[in-house]
Amino acid sequence: MGTDLFSLFNDPAYWESLSKILPQSVNETIYMVIVSTFLAYVLGVPMGVFLVITSADHILPNPWVERTLGTVINIFRSIPFIILLVALIPFTKELVGTSIGTTAAIVPLVVSAAPFVARLVESSLKEVSHGVIEAALSMGASPWQIISKVLLPEAKSPLILGMAITTINIIAYTAMAGAVGGGGLGDLAIQYGYNRFRTDIMIITVFILVIFVQGIQWVGTTLARKLSHR
Amino acid sequence: MIYINNLTKVYKTPGGSLTALKDINLHIPKGAVYGIIGLSGAGKSTLIRCLNMLERPSSGQIILDGQKMTELSGKMLRKARQNIGMIFQHFNLLDSRTVAGNIAFPLEIAGWPKEQIIERVKELLPLVGLEDKADIYPAQLSGGQKQRIGIARALATKPSVLLCDEATSALDPQTTVSILNLLKEINEKLNLTIVIITHEMKVIKEICTDVAVIDQSQIVERGPVESVFIHPQSDIAKEFVSSIFPNELPNELLRELSLHPGSQIVRIHFLGTAASEPLITDLIRHCGVSVNILYGSIDHLRSTLFGTLTLELQGSPESLHTAGSFLQSKNLTVEVINNGN
Ligand SMILES: Nc1ncnc2c1ncn2[C@@H]1O[C@H](COP(=O)(O)OP(=O)(O)OP(=O)(O)O)[C@@H](O)[C@H]1O
Ligand SMILES: [Mg+2]
């Protein structure tokens, strides 16, 4: 088996045949990950910011908003992804017109990642010291200035680390979404590696995913370190 | 400049309400360096935070530079705050910005145009002695340097008042003196009104023109620094003064002195020029008393010389009386501690 794979991987014709299916799956995964991460942040950052600023002793304390938002986030975070994937099918159909394919897979990915992002953003922004916020208030900063000039810039490093974690999670989830017709590397691994016993394809997809994860974590850690001036 | 009228602050806590400030009345004149001293928990921070409404008073009124702060909110309050600088015990700088970026921060908030911000930062850096540190991040600087950034930042929008909450409490004694000197310099150069909260009498002694003593949520004593140092009225003020000008004579010495019949122990305080007069020679020559120096110290209050001399005078009742009148005539503050018998 080992020698089999070895000679297989050394055969140019093999790669030729693979190049018909692999790039498309890689592109689909990248597409799903980028769009889902982006949308999850578009939704998650405001939620995280609201969780922080409405908490007691912060700039716009509002227990009602904080509690309601927190509860909604908790509910979505407690639904397992695989259930969300199925439960959201009608909603996805309504939204994008279909419930299969990469674009359709983005809907459950975003719905599941956004509340996670909200909590990550919340914990990152809570690390900004009360004193710094107070200093900004004493200079006459508005709530929006405090968010945009104090909270977000001061929490840059943890936010970037959180983004690496989110992206990696989404990669894992795209594989799961692939299993139910979402396309991408997960789809490839299931269709060929599992259904057709193509161990070679299984190995290659796992290898590519590992490279993705390593790369993202490396970029995240490096950026976070570079931007931290503590 | 600042009028504090009937200021009261009550904190509502789960365990009941806590009165942090009780009916505070205070006038802080323009150009003053007004020290507010008190023990931990006395209400100092609450008081200074009420001045710029970081803390909302429960009742009473704050008028600052003609503005009724207590009646402001929203945009008006933010505008008014740009006229009040504040520095903090733990500096509270933005770690993600360089020194120049930190100083530019309040100007960005106030909506200054970019070119003017750059100009202003260039002016401020040398004022606080950080001209070669513009592009460095605060994490690489010492506590004293961080507080210098804090000061530059607080002065950026050219405020008319500077509030300092324990601005030197996190610094070593030497750095404390350099920061206090900087504040004094700024007060003199810009005629800026400074309010300083502290629990250290040293801070009051170094730069304040006036002082208020706060104890258990109330102001128990206030006045020009010299008069509070020379004639502290309240127990707490006396304690604060003696923390840096120890003037209690040891009991053993007092006991021994009481064996000298007809002697009198007096304490003399002198301020400014009086310190340079040949006092003791005159006492001996003109009053016919013999003088025994028990304790003496010379120091300064802000920039004025401030000396204390504890003397034992011996002589006939008449000559002691003459000596007393002589000292009074010199405009010195004389306290008779012990009349010998
Ligand atoms: N946000 C708050 N909620 C409830 N109680 C408070 C709050 N802030 C201060 N207090 C209480 O008010 C009193 C005065 O506090 P304050 O911080 O003004 O004292 P302080 O003189 O500055 O003391 P320190 O020298 O320790 O800083 C204290 O008893 C304190 O516990
Ligand atoms: Mg305090």
Image: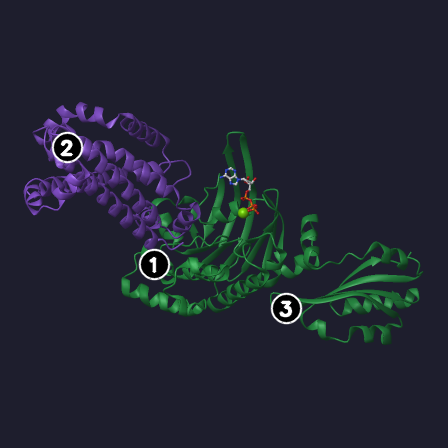
Residue B158's x, y, as percent? Answer: 40, 62
Left or right of A34: which side holds B317?
right
Residue at image mark 1: B107
Q: Which chain is green?
A: B
Number of residues whose C-alpha sits closer than 10 Å to that of mark 2, classed few (under 14), some (14–19) or many (20 or more): some
Q: Colour of chain A?
A: purple
Residue at image mark 2: A193
Q: For residue A34, say whether it is visible.
A: yes
Question: What is the chain identity of the residue bearing mark 3?
Answer: B
| In front: label 2 or label 1 | 2
Question: What is the chain identity of the residue bearing mark 1?
Answer: B
Secondary structure category for the residue under label 1: helix
At 78% from the left edge and 66% from the top edge, which residue is drawn? Answer: B328
Q: Verify CB contact (< 8 Å) between mark 3 and mark 2.
A: no
Residue A97's x, y, as percent? Answer: 7, 29
**Of label 3 and label 1, which has the lower sequence position?**
1
Q: The disc labelled 3 sits on which kind of residue?
A: Thr
Residue at image mark 3: B304
Instruction: Give the mark count.
Output: 3
Residue B307's x, y, as percent? Answer: 71, 67
Q: For residue B159, say whether it is visible.
A: no
Q: Verify CB contact (< 8 Å) between mark 3 and mark 1.
A: no
